[in-house]
Image (tube, helix red, strand yellow):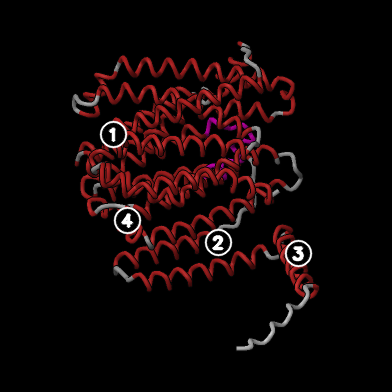
Amino acid sequence: MLKKLLKESFIYGLSGYISKFIGVFLLPLYTAVLNPSDYGILDLLNSVAVFSSFLIISGTDASVGYFYFRKEFQSEKNILVSSGLIIRIVFSLSIAAVLMIISPFLSDLIFHGEGRELIMLYSVYIAFNAIYFFATELLRFSIKPWMYTFFSTGNVLLNILSAILFVLVLKLGVTGVIYASILSYGVFAVFGVIYIIKNYKLQFSFKWAKNILAYGAPLIGTAVASWVLNYSDRYFLNYLSGLNQIGIYSVGLKVAAIMGAFSGAFQMAWGPFCSDIQYEPNAKKIYAKVFQLYFVLNTILVFLVSIFASEILQVLTQPAYYSAVYVIPLLCFSMVFTGGYFIAAAGIGLSKKLQHTIWIMLIAAAVNILLNTLLTPTWLSIGSAIAILAANFTIFIFTLITSQKYYRIEYKYSFIIALMSASGVLIWLSSHYRIGLWMKILLGVVYLGLSGTYLYRSYRNSDEFRKAVEMFSKFRKSKKKFKEDEPLPAEKPEDPF
């Protein structure tokens, strides 16, 4: 079972890593064309897109996912999916229309009167984006990782190629980035709708629409609180220091997303996997293994990205963005707890206690706002990064405690805590004392050696490890046998000269 999860995580992550690799590869070009204020504009527009997406989705992704895996509804799967698609299309077009109507108000609120056209353009992207993600979520539910990879990777490649055309060739700046997003998400949203109609038919059931919306309704409050949690810091930064700090913060997020791709891949594979094995007799043991493996591997990635953050920024960006080095470790750890929340929430989801996610998100949102109020005026983007880290840690802890109450799993915390603590201390020391590249490499080798030793000792007796050793042994034996059976090469005749 664990092997299946790791395999699907790799496949889901393949598109994510391709996306991150291409994005990182183009970062030097974008930072040469777009200044920090331009990045700030895009980040604020993205915050509008995320809020709008929460309203469009209205918890329906979770609804369709829940009913999709229930044994008693398997005969109605087609009409469930088709009804969900129609709801998504109607909600997408409605929210896009509302955004266009209120674009003058949003322009005054966010950009001080400028940017109405950008908001109207972005509303088109938002509609396509929501429809596209319904299709890709369905591919995850149906456990078709390769098809998912085709959709997501194709979308990324088209987006990047379009961005090169509109931003680098035609010099359209922020507008060009939006055009690229509209084109890529529009094309694959259409592909997604065609795929769903072909495989699930186009039909609508008011009964299923009611079930989908009723299940998802409690999650709307959670989604809004999540938005406050993850995006309110941009508005603090915009109010206190302008778009420039938002742009630097955004670049820090892009670098942190290098390791976030692994966390996201694990998260995407986890949902269907968790639901699929819930009836297995050893499900809790598997959940505990996944929990530990997730945090150990992600902490190692956080260490590597964070300790070499200054070198990464020097290679990929311009001097205007170098101060992002201070927010990268904080944002990396924040991403780890964000992904960890989904694993810790297994008990809440399986016991159908989703109402708890509302108060948990509200508390975390309050923590974020409070810390932004206290820290951002003095520390700017660093203060915002501390606030989001604290808020995501709050979500993780309360989710874990609540989930354990309804569905207890015997997790092992000691090594995870020790590894994270050591990672945090070493990252701080390397930054505070500005140690050189070779010392960083030495620290990295020692850290990886100790972590790898622990993983080996922890999993050497597991079925997955034994199978890997057996496969390696068979490979070595076959290679040795091949060499023994191979005829000796004929001796070369002596050179007469």
Q: Which amino acid does label 2 sit on?
A: Ser
Q: From the image, tell me which residue sits under label 2.
A: 414
Q: Mark 1 points at which residue?
A: 170
Q: Give the range drawn in magenta.
A: 341-356
Gap in angstroms between the C-alphas marked 1 and 2: 54 Å
Label 1 sits on a secondary structure element that is loop
Q: Can residue 393 be seen in this view?
A: no
If you read the primary sequence from the N terminus, does the residue marked by circle 3 or circle 1 appear first? 1
Position of residue 427 relative to residue 237, above or below, is below
Which mark is first along the chain, 3 or 2? 2
Would you name the residue on which mark 4 appears?
A: 313
Residue picked out by circle 3: 470
Which of the two residues, 227 or 45, is positioned nearer the viewer here? 45
N-terminal-most mark, 4 or 2: 4
Position of residue 440 relative to residue 23, above or below, is below
- The answer to which of marks 1 and 2 sits earlier in the sequence is 1
In 3D space, how far apart are the residues under numbered discs 1 and 4 (Cα atoms)?
Answer: 26 Å
Q: Is residue 131 visible?
A: yes
Q: Is residue 468 left or right of residue 401?
A: right
